[in-house]
Amino acid sequence: MNSAILLGVATVVVALFLALLSPGPVSILIVKSGIKNRILDALGLSLGIVLCIVWLGNILTYSVLPHRVLKSLGEIFLLYLAIKALKTRKMDFQTKCNMSTSQPC
């Protein structure tokens, strides 16, 4: 086997492993696919996700406009979360915290 191909396969395997380590909806989708369908389907799904991430990374690296748009959308979302957190009253937080757990927050 060619060493370049072997390096490429190893890179994809490491990327898939790291993607499975991070919790989130993508990990749940991959595990669900592996349980419901064949393992090859889950590996194909994982490979597709990794290729989409690499493709998006290439677009954001070489194109200025999409990078700025995505960056601006992220900033707006963070501002929205900050404003929402500032508007939340302390009483609301304590009530939700006491209802969800038996221990004090």
Image (spheres, rainbow, N blue to C red):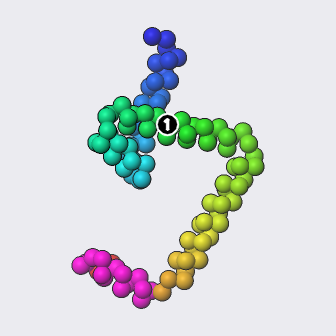
Image position of 59 with respect to 93: above or below:
above
Q: Residue drawn at (36%, 81%), measured in percent from left and top? A: 96
Q: Establish if 101 lies above or below 25.
A: below
Q: Picture coordinates of residue 2 (x, y %)?
A: 49, 11
Q: What stretch is highlighted in magenta?
A: 90-103
Tell me if residue 63 comes above or below residue 100 in the rendering: above
Residue matched to label 1: 48
Say whether residue 95 is magenta: yes
**What secondary structure is marked by label 1?**
helix
Up/down of 39 relative to 24, above or below: above
Q: Which amino acid does label 1 sit on?
A: Gly
Residue 27 belongs to magenta span: no
- Locate the N terminus by quadrant: top left
Q: Return the residue nearer the eye: 30 or 2.
A: 30
Question: x, y (%) of residue 38?
Answer: 31, 34
Image-quadrant location for residue 102:
bottom left
| Residue 99, percent from left and from top | 30, 81
Q: Residue 105: which quarter of the image? A: bottom left
Report the front residue among 25 and 18.
Answer: 25
Residue 98 in view in this figure: yes
Residue at point 36%, 50% (across, down):
28
The answer to whether residue 14 of the structure is visible from this angle is no
How many badges with numbers are in the image?
1
- Residue 8 as seen in the image, left or right of residue 28: right
Which residue is located at x 42 percent, y 89 percent? 91
Q: Which residue is drawn at 48% across and 86% down?
A: 89
Q: Main secondary structure of the magenta part?
A: helix
